């Protein structure tokens, strides 16, 4: 569930803020607005996943594997 954290709360328990952001956006209230903290799953695919599909590999598809 989304929550708005104060800067002090976020600073005091950063691991909890980041863990909560895995399931829903979290917000940290600032003096003139708020910051959104959200988790985005890495979109990298394994070489096995790439080779199991009937798609052609493009330059860069295997970079970093």
Image (cartoon, rainbow, N blue to C red):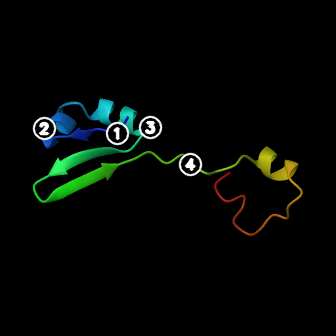
Q: From the viewer's perspective, is 27 left or right of 42?
A: left
Distance from disc 4 to disc 2, alpha carbons, whole Å, reads: 29 Å
Who is closer to the viewer here, 4 or 54? 4
Distance from disc 4 to disc 1, alpha carbons, whole Å, reads: 21 Å
Q: From the viewer's perspective, is 64 left or right of 56?
A: left
Residue 40 placement (x, y as % from top left)? 49, 48
Point out the frontmost of discs 4 and 1.
1
**With respect to residue 12, does 4 lie above or below?**
below
Who is closer to the viewer here, 27 or 62? 27
Q: Which residue is mark 3?
A: 22
Q: Earlier in the sequence, mark 4 or mark 2?
A: 2
**With respect to residue 6, does 50 lie above or below?**
below
Which element type, helix, strand or loop, lies under badge 4?
loop
Residue 63 placement (x, y as % from top left)? 67, 59
Q: Earlier in the sequence, mark 4 or mark 3?
A: 3
Point out the frontmost of discs 1 and 2.
1
Query: Residue 42: which numbered mark, if any?
Result: 4
Distance from disc 1 to disc 3, alpha carbons, whole Å, reads: 10 Å
Which element type, helix, strand or loop, lies under badge 3?
loop
Residue at (68%, 51%) from the top-left corner?
Answer: 65
Residue 2 placement (x, y as % from top left)? 34, 39
Query: Residue 8: which numbered mark, if any?
Result: 2
Distance from disc 4 to disc 3, alpha carbons, whole Å, reads: 12 Å
Q: Which residue is mark 1?
A: 2
């Amino acid at each position: 569930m989304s929550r708005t954290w104060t800067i002090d709360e976020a600073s005091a328990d950063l691991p909890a803020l980041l863990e909560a952001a895995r399931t829903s956006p979290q917000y940290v209230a600032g003096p003139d607005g708020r910051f959104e903290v959200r988790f985005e799953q890495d979109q990298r695919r394994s070489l096995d996943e790439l080779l199991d599909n009937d798609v052609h590999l493009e330059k860069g598809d295997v970079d970093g594997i």
